[in-house]
Image (tube, rainbow, N blue to C red):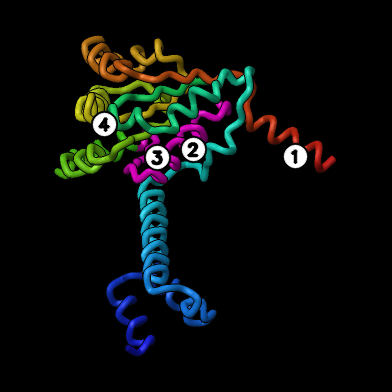
Amino acid sequence: MNNQNTLEKMKQMKLYGMYEAFTTAIQSGMSNSLTQDQFIAQLVEHEHDDRKHRKYKRLVSNAKFRYNASLEDVIFSEHRNLNKLELLRLAECSFIDKAENVLITGSTGVGKSYLASALGYHACSLDYKVGYYNTSRLISSLKLARAAGTYLRETNKIQRMDLVILDDYGLQSLDKDARMILMDLIEDRHERKSTMITSQLPVASWYEIIGEKTHADAIMDRLTHHAHRIELEGESLRKKSNQNTLEINA
């Protein structure tokens, strides 16, 4: 069979990994040094890797992370109160399988959002669907969705995520509509899916942000039940970065 026809059929069938591997093999003459079994195995391996890579890129794109983050770049130190063993356990993502939550707190600039993004990227590499949201913007958009009649459609999208990251929780107190929206989000995911929250405020202060006691108790009970807590400490990493830049430029 004509190689060009085979390549065209691979493209039509969207076998892009096989297409690239077959093209390389033809150009290099590598296929002549392999048995048929070896050559077919190599084509399948390239297709598998290509599909996995494209799926990862798609998951990352859909997640809309705040930072391009990696667990390998996370800084561990006693001053940050960040235990490497604890983070490696979270990186296994069994907390997602168990529908457990992760609560990350600490003052501004200590790396909460970066850490959440790094865990989210890693979850994507393991084929989990992740959604990254600024809490205030998400609640505002869902208020608009409720007025437009698309609320259920939007919340169903969020519910399908294996892991939802709510960043910068607690920057402003919640009004009645915001409380109801947060309650819906947390209730839908409770013991079904995982939620990760970052906040400048300690967990004990979240009740006050929610406001109304009945809703605060219900939301916090669901959030803290089987939750992993990371309480970051230390100086702002942004300040350190700026100081290092000044020293280099001095």
Local crowd size for mark 3, using a 10 Å CA cut-off: few (<14), some (14–19), many (≥20): many
> Which tag, 2 or 4, sits closer to the chain's start?
2
Q: Which residue is mark 3?
A: 123
> Which tag, 3 or 1, sits closer to the chain's start?
3
Check contact, mark 3 vs mark 4: CB within 8 A: no
The residue lying toward the viewer, choosing from 114 and 123, is 123
Q: Which residue is mark 4?
A: 193
Helix, strand or loop at mark 2: helix
In the image: residue 73, left or right of residue 15: right
Local crowd size for mark 4, using a 10 Å CA cut-off: few (<14), some (14–19), many (≥20): many
Q: Quadrant of residue 170?
A: top left
The answer to if 131 sits in the magenta stretch is: yes
In the image: residue 218, left or right of residue 58: left
Residue 72 vertical position relative to residue 2 in the rendered view, above or below: above
- Dot 3 amino acid type: Ala
> Gap in Å between the C-alphas at discs 1 and 4?
41 Å
Q: Which residue is mark 2?
A: 118
Q: Which residue is mark 1?
A: 245
- Dot 1 amino acid type: Thr
- Dot 2 amino acid type: Ala
The residue lying toward the viewer, choosing from 22 and 211, is 22
